[in-house]
Image (cartoon, coloured by chain):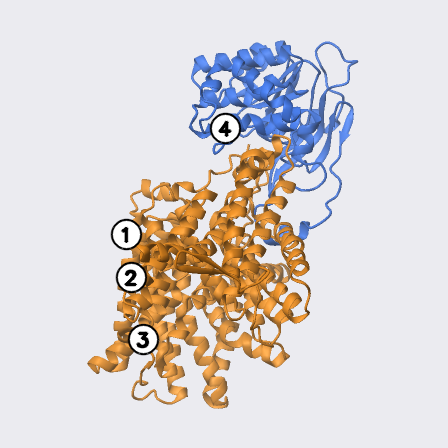
Chain colours: A orange, B blue
Amino acid sequence: MTDFITYVIQGIPFGCVFALVAVGLVLTYKTSGVFNLAFGAQAFVAASLYYVLHVRHGWPTLLAFALVVLVISPLLGLLLDVLIFRHLRTASPIAKLVSSLGLLVAVPEIVTILVLGESSTFGVVGIWWNDNALYRFSDYVIDGKEMAIIVSTLLVVLLLGLLFRFAPIGLRMRAVVESPRMTELAGVNADRVSAFSWMLSSLLAGLAGVLLAPLYASLAPQNFTTLLIAAIAAAAFARLTSIPMALVGGLLLGIIQALLSGYLPPASVIAQSVKPTLPFAALFLLLLFWPGLRSAIQNKDPLSGVDPPPDPSVAVTRGRFLTNATRVSGVVVGTGVLLWLLTAATTYWIGIATTAVVLSIVFLSITVITGMAGQVSLCQATFAGVGAFSTAQIVKVLGLSVLPTLLLGAAVAAVVGALLAVPMLRLGGIFLSLGTLAFAVMFDTLLAPLGWVSGGAHPVSVPRPIGFVDDRPFLILCVVVLAIVSVFVIFIRRGTTGRYLTALRGSETAARSIGINPTRIRILAFAVSAGIAGLGGGILAVQKGVAVKEDFGYFYGLFFVVLVVTLMPSTVEGAINAGVGFALVPEVLKLVGVSSSWQFVLFGLGAITYARHPEGVLEFQKGKSLAAIQKRLPARLRGPVPGPTPVPTGGAD
Amino acid sequence: MSVGADVAASGAPLTSSADDSTVPLLELRSVDAAYGPFRALFGVSLAVRPGTVTALLGANGAGKTTVARVATGLVRPTAGEMWFEGERIAWPPRIGVGFVERWFTRAAWIDRRGVRPFEITRLGIVHAPEGRSVFASLSVRENLELSFRRELGAHGVKGALAKAYELFPRLGERSHQVAGTLSGGEQRMLSLARVMVNPPKLLVADELSLGLAPIVVDEVYASLATIRDAGTSILLVEQYVGHALAIADDVVVLNHGTVAHSGPATSLDDITDLLL
């Protein structure tokens, strides 16, 4: 019994850590309607600034804390609101999620490049007057950093409770989330309210960042991201709405973790993988089974009809000549590059080209799931990993030849995708994305380290297929595979499945009413997408000669989505662009002489535009410039333009 | 579209039934409005005299709701003027972060140029929008508090709530119920309660009878009469001509985004075909 109490007390500090972040997530969701994945990034900004001021420049604790948490953090929140989220208030929840995902990828890199620099970030110091002061409870001792977290968490929950209960601003914040326009019709300045909520939640993120930083040996964005994802479980427990429940959820999570590590034999595999996996498994299960969570999806703004209709896609306004001209020039450039690669290019550039081609295959899976099915899946890198590990293991254990095994690996990934899709399809929108994220992290922490999956400490090597051992033939093989998969994807899009998916994206109800079974068609899309990713992952492993789990970490899943969404999520061409971008942008950055981390910044910030350009910024710009060229063409080349032209009369009432 | 276009283009002072000397409470002069590339209003001019009910009639898609939205600032006119109590409502050129808005969002939330809806509301124009016009996720009491708190201050809220519940006892019984679970009629009561407790200068009521049982429609119109008697002018957007004409002093008929007819309510007898 005393053991039990000791473990419970042991779990409280980490429970409060989860709770603090979860409270922040719930607060942001409640007051701005954004499931703010960037919360982790905001926390990292504050932690870094605090570290630089306090540790590197020797500012006094209180001054550094006050400047970072009370001034800079709210200003950052204000900036995010004014520049980004204010304009997304009527966007779909999934568009907001993608925007915050872009920030999560971009902002920590900006901070690392501009603020932290190359030098080490060890020795973060907490805000308690003595980090190592010890407080004795029963048999367990809590130190200063933990005490700071416990006290602040309780204070934050108390203050927020009072704010929402007694201050009119609490009511206004909830009103703005439901409908900014109707709030204005009640005479309330919705902009000011939303600025306040962003400043408040950013302040909380700053507080969390400064408090949590000393728990880790050094400052690393990954720690904050992983912690953020873990805390989503506590937020889900609170149904994304209740701040006290977020506290309870966080504490429960911390205590259960402590109990598990206390009672399970410490050296066992179960204990070592279960403890870190617990929050993600909990999130996964909560998303699937927690009653009331999914009904927390906000009510639709009744005044959304005031918005102008979406911009018409400009790409359709080109005539036959221009279409042919772009196609021919595309083929000419492609062939030219290929010829150069096969004759003159150095091994280095062939390697980069191969990476581009292989990644294009992986990105085609995002074309299927995001571009065609309209779902944002954050675990495509994991599917690629499943394909890579299965390929490697089958080749190693059964001794099959590599080429057919790649297909087997893709099949395994497809089965995993389908199995994941069955429960996940009950979830829609952001909950599906969060579920795939939970799955990705679970795979990372639970399965990927195991020997029979990735080979554990000794990654499994994969030979190249006979005849394709050299780099040039292997590149040709990859190009052929890419061509086959591209044609396959195009066939799906033009075929019945693609049209069903388009119909479902338009309106699920309408699609049902004409007899489309959404569950079946979505499971199919998920399985196909996972299979393509698995195939790409397998080839990536073959290219490298070894299947390494670091190549398929959950962060890549996030980055892949950000990358493809910035370019062209809905076309095969877009996937190839993304592959080329993934391989080439770091090279270009190297050439310019800046850190290759800028690619995360570039694509992360690009993803923010997803709300306005779901077809991708690049696609949008391409359509715009093609339309401009079309206009300047001589009349005889212009030809008849397909597609509808908007009628200037009538419209919405 | 051509019907009444000349009336609209001239921008001439509008005929009102009796007293031309009074300044109209609300006046639209040759207003154009559009949703993106879709134009909804073509040179609409109309006026609401103080203390009267003006019915805005027309078929589906005629532009009635757009007129209501222009009057409350939700839609910014692309041309024309709006005057309230003899003052011009100004929509000056866009400043600030508009380019960011255009870049990031497909859905420009509201046009952030010049006067915003909350400012127009504070001038004394209250809009009961079409369809669901309450905050579905807030309780009945919170819905009322949201506007009372600003209009009457923290001390006035209690009295105002009591008055609202006295007018509509059903709301009192359900004060802690989430407004989204109220019936359609109760939701209309809720949006009217706010207006009746603290009468604005102008109520813009959009399709109040939509989707309601006939008996509830009668209740709603009785409430409107009470509101009018308290001194509030009403711009009444309505598809059901009978109900509207029973209470209206003036009438404006829209057709394809232009004013097809305007005049006293009694003048409508011989032009019914314009509505159909």
The residue tagged with tag 3: helix, strand or loop?
helix
Front tag of 3 and 2: 2
Specify the amino acid type for callout 4: Gly
Residue at the disc numbered 2:
A263
Identify which residue is drawn at 24% across, 77% down.
A394
The numbered mark at residue A108 is none
Q: Position of residue A460 (x, y in %)?
A: 31, 81
Using the image, name the chain to which the residue with label 3 belongs.
A
Task: State which quadrant residue A160 falls in.
Answer: top right
What residue is pinned by disc 4? B131
Around disc 3, counting alpha carbons within 10 Å, would you say few (fewer than 14), some (14 to 19), or many (20 or more)?
A: many
The label on residue A454 is 3
| Same chain check for tags 1 and 3 | yes
Q: Nearer the viewer, mark 1 or mark 3?
A: 3
Tell me the amino acid under the disc marked 3: Ser
**Nearer to us: label 2 or label 1:** 2
- Give the x, y percent position of residue A331: 48, 74
Q: CA distance from mark 4 to mark 3?
A: 57 Å
Horizontal relation, residue B58 to residue A561: left or right? right
Amino acid under label 2? Tyr
> In the structure shown, which secondary structural element does the residue marked by tag 1 occupy?
helix
Marked residue chain, label 1: A
**Relative to A199, is A549 on the left or the right?**
left
Q: Position of residue A638 (x, y in %)?
A: 58, 60
How packed mark 2 is, by other alpha carbons closer than 10 Å (few <14, some 14-19, many 20 or more), is: few
Find disc 1 in the rendering and name its residue.
A520
Amino acid beneath label 1: Arg
Please report whichever mark, 1 or 3, sits nearer to the chain's N-terminal start. Answer: 3
Quadrant assignment for the N terminus of chain A: bottom left
